[in-house]
């Protein structure tokens, strides 16, 4: 008995891959994917196309509020997804193992591999992504057909410490990104207390003692070095003062009594990180002591 495979674009395999369920059987899936590839390609350069792939009602102001870095990350997703969908329209089909030695095309995995190899050439090496990352991007995109399903919390809902201390907020985000593989929340709390709050307290003490001026910009790299130099040069003044009490005052100024685990996780959520339960897989990840793994939207573990 000879069995003939249906066209892959009419199969459940393709509908599941691109999230067109059995309720959409009348949809010409191949044409839909071709249309999406054109929209995605347009979104790389045009705001109106990009807004089609964002929550309903998105405006130019929303894009501006999102920030240039975040918009560029969305355009990057569009670049890879557009290329993958375009290649799928041309070459996606049953493979040799699926079609009893009568293949009609290549697998989605092979398409993702070829696209990442091709498109990565247009980015710096540190910005390259893997075929696995592209597959994850498709998984997050395919259901709602949005590269940004929802906007991050508005700045007015952000914790006061993050709003009032942008430089320290960036330093927290940088620390987390550099410690993703062996993240421990207690290490981050220690870093915030000792390196950030401690430094802010010493700055206030030196300011009161006229060692530095109010005009010192703690976010300017050159002046940061000057501040660090002033801290090292005046240990006697700092020793005479109650630095710990000054740290408590810094916390109070930012609406805090202390910094605990829940506070830190809340801050990290506002800085673009997610705390996900560990799930068994064939891949080994380094976990923190709670059996959870911190991931960042900014590095492409989740996209």
Image (tube, rainbow, N blue to C red):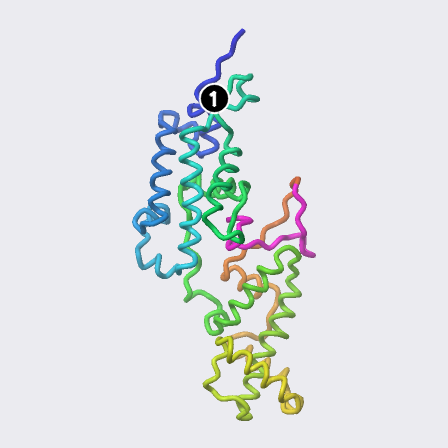
Q: Is residue 190 magenta?
A: no
Total of numbered circles in the picture?
A: 1
- For image coordinates 30% across by 55% down, the residue present is 59
Indicate the position of residue 235 as horizontal and vertical percent values.
65, 88
Q: Which residue is at 49% across, 46% downward? A: 120
The residue that appears at 34% across and 39% down in the rendered structure is 38
Q: Position of residue 294 (x, y in %)?
A: 60, 55
Please tell me whether residue 209 is drawn above or below residue 70 in the rendered image: below
Magenta residue check for 296:
yes
Q: Quadrant of the N terminus?
A: top right
Q: Is residue 143 left or right of residue 98?
A: left
Q: Residue at x 46, y 28 (%)?
A: 92
Residue 3 versus residue 89: which sits nearer the camera? 89
Q: Tag 1's secondary structure?
A: loop
Q: Main secondary structure of the magenta part?
A: loop
| Structural crowding at the residue carrying mark 1, measured as other residues with C-alpha within 10 Å and reported as few (<14), some (14–19) or many (≥20) | some
Expressed as whole percent of the image width and height from the top left, the position of residue 106 reads 50, 28
Judge whether 127 appears above or below 132 on screen.
Answer: below
Residue at the extreme front of the image, as rendered = 121
Residue on which the image places disc 1: 104
Q: Residue 39 occupies which quadrant of the picture?
A: top left
| x and y, in percent, of residue 53 in the image | 36, 46
- Please give the range of residues in magenta: 283-303
């Amino acid at each position: 008995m000879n069995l003939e495979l249906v066209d892959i674009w009419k199969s459940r395999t393709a509908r599941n891959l691109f999230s067109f369920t059995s309720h959409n059987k009348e949809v010409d899936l191949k044409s839909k994917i071709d249309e999406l590839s054109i929209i995605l390609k347009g979104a790389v350069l045009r705001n109106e196309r990009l807004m089609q792939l964002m929550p309903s009602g998105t405006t130019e102001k929303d894009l501006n509020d999102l920030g240039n870095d975040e918009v560029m990350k969305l355009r990057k997703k569009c670049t890879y997804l557009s290329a993958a969908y375009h290649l799928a329209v041309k070459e996606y089909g049953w493979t040799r193992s699926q079609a009893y030695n009568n293949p009609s095309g290549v697998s989605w995995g092979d398409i993702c591999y070829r696209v990442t190899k091709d498109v990565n050439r247009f980015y710096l090496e540190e910005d390259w992504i893997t075929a696995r990352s592209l597959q994850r991007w498709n998984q997050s995109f395919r259901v709602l057909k949005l590269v940004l399903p929802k906007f991050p919390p508005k700045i007015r809902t952000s914790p006061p410490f993050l709003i009032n201390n942008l430089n320290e907020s960036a330093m927290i985000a940088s620390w987390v990104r550099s410690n993703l593989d062996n993240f421990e929340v207690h290490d981050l709390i220690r870093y915030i207390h000792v390196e950030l709050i401690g430094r802010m307290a010493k700055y206030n003490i030196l300011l009161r003692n006229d060692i530095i001026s109010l005009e010192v910009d703690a976010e300017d790299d050159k002046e940061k070095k000057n501040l660090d130099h002033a801290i090292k040069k005046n240990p006697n003044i700092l020793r005479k003062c109650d630095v710990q009490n000054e740290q408590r005052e810094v916390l109070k100024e930012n609406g805090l009594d202390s910094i605990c685990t829940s506070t830190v996780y809340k801050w990290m959520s506002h800085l673009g990180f997610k705390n996900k339960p560990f799930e068994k897989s064939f891949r080994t990840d380094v976990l923190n002591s709670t059996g959870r793994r911190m991931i960042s939207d900014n590095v492409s573990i989740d996209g």
